[in-house]
Amino acid sequence: MRKEARSVWFIFVLTAGLSCGISASEVLKFDIGQPASLVQIEGWDIDVRPDGLGLPVGSGKALSGEDLYEEKCASCHGSFGEGEGRWPKLAGGFGTLSDVRPEKTVGSYWPYVSTLWDYIHRAMPFLQPQSLTDDEVYSLTAYILFLNDLIDEDFVLTHKNLPTIVLPNQPHFVNDPRPDVHNTRCMVDCISADSNLAWDTANLDVTPKVTLKKMSDNNDSKTAMPSAQAVALSTYVQSCAVCHDAGLSGSPILGDKKAWGVRLELGITSLYEHAINGYLGTSGYMPAKGGNSSLSDPEVKAVVDYMVMMAR
Ligand code: HEC
Ligand code: HEC
């Protein structure tokens, strides 16, 4: 864990430098800040993994967590984990997950005990986070498991047996079944013309539009990736939406069947012509190519096609 944290820091500096087009050695000349020391990293590196990695050596008995819980936790979470007022419940709720109002607690919902240990250790008590000793966290974790009838009051929870306790809902957490999440990670030139995307990234507005445009320029007609429509959409978003999304200065709103119907009666050629060269109409002024002179005529036509399609 510790090593990972350090290399992440290093990679960050390296990539930040490289993306500005300078070498790693030059980066070091900035003289800003200082490398995080091992002690500093240790302070942050407190996460615990389901397999127990990150757990400190220690132990605690459920029963010995009771007093501590009463003193430091019950005022909010209730003596039996039932939650005072609207503070979170920590126990119960079994069998409610498919209800309209599921009761998600550590016992009914959480997949791993490691998360419980980590959460208490990191964040509780709410007003004095990270004030508990490791053994106190073990006892409290054990006590909350006991409140959920998952262990006996005499059970001694340790760093060794903690990962072996299986919470009831764990089997219902499944790996993401979508095929694209199982790919090998790719960091450069990841979308190729023949990659088979299941959904259109342009519609989600997550793929940089510059990339889309570059790809469409390089496309031969056989590999229509991304779809012409996706390119049209991204052009629309960049150059036309500012007016046509909201009907600014008298422009027909995207998807407004009535407004577009009237215009379509004059024929698509007239629409192309007006969009490319601009015109002063009865409701307002449409600037040539929406004011973006870098657009080619076919690009504008494609957007008009898209706008017309949206009005059908
Ligand atoms: C002042 C009120 C307060 C006290 C005292 C308190 N908690 Fe919490 N606890 C909260 C709140 C609020 C949350 C939810 C925080 C959030 O969702 O960001 C929470 C969340 C939790 C959760 C996660 C519950 C879930 O299902 O998401 C656990 C476990 C927990 N507390 C344990 C404890 C333990 C153990 C103690 C005593 C050492 C404690 N808390 C003391 C207010 C409190
Ligand atoms: C600054 C605001 C603005 C921008 C940006 C803008 N438009 Fe327009 N557009 C208008 C207005 C106003 C009208 C209506 C003019 C009228 O008919 O009076 C209009 C009308 C149109 C029409 C209908 C033409 C007709 O003959 O009825 C089309 C097609 C069109 N715009 C396409 C586009 C495209 C494509 C873009 C982006 C490349 C775009 N517009 C960007 C303001 C804008």
Image (tube, rainbow, N blue to C red):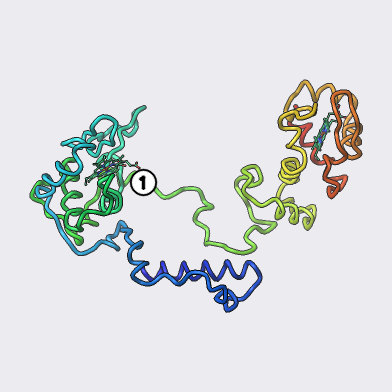
Q: Quadrant of residue 244?
A: top right
Q: Secondary structure at mark 1?
A: loop
* Near-viewer residue (271 or 6): 6
Camera-nearest residue between 288 and 198: 288
Along the line of sight, the residue nearer the viewer: 96 or 72: 72
Q: Position of residue 254 (x, y in %)?
A: 74, 30
Q: Position of residue 132 (x, y in %)?
A: 21, 54
Considering only vertical position in the picture, is 73 above or below 101? Answer: below
Q: Residues within 10 Å of mark 1 (few under 14, many from 20)?
A: few
Identify the residue shown where x is 79% and y is 31%: 308
Q: Residue at x 34, y 32 (%)?
A: 98
Q: Residue furthest left?
A: 154
In the image, is 273 to the left or to the right of 182?
A: right
The residue lying at 36 percent from left, 67 percent from top is 40
* Residue 16 percent across, percent down from the top left: 58, 66
Residue 262 visible from this viewpoint? yes
Looking at the image, is 48 positioned above or below residue 152? below
- Image position of 86 (left or right of 286): left
The residue shown at (64%, 67%) is 20
Q: Amino acid at mark 1?
A: Phe
Q: Is residue 183 above or below residue 101?
A: below
Q: Quadrant of the C terminus?
A: top right
- x and y, in percent, of residue 133 in the image: 20, 57
Residue 1 visible in this rendered orientation of the protein: no
Location of the N terminus by quadrant is: bottom left
Residue identified by numbered label 1 = 173
Q: Is residue 70 left or right of residue 191?
A: left
- When asked about the image quadrant of residue 29, the answer is bottom right
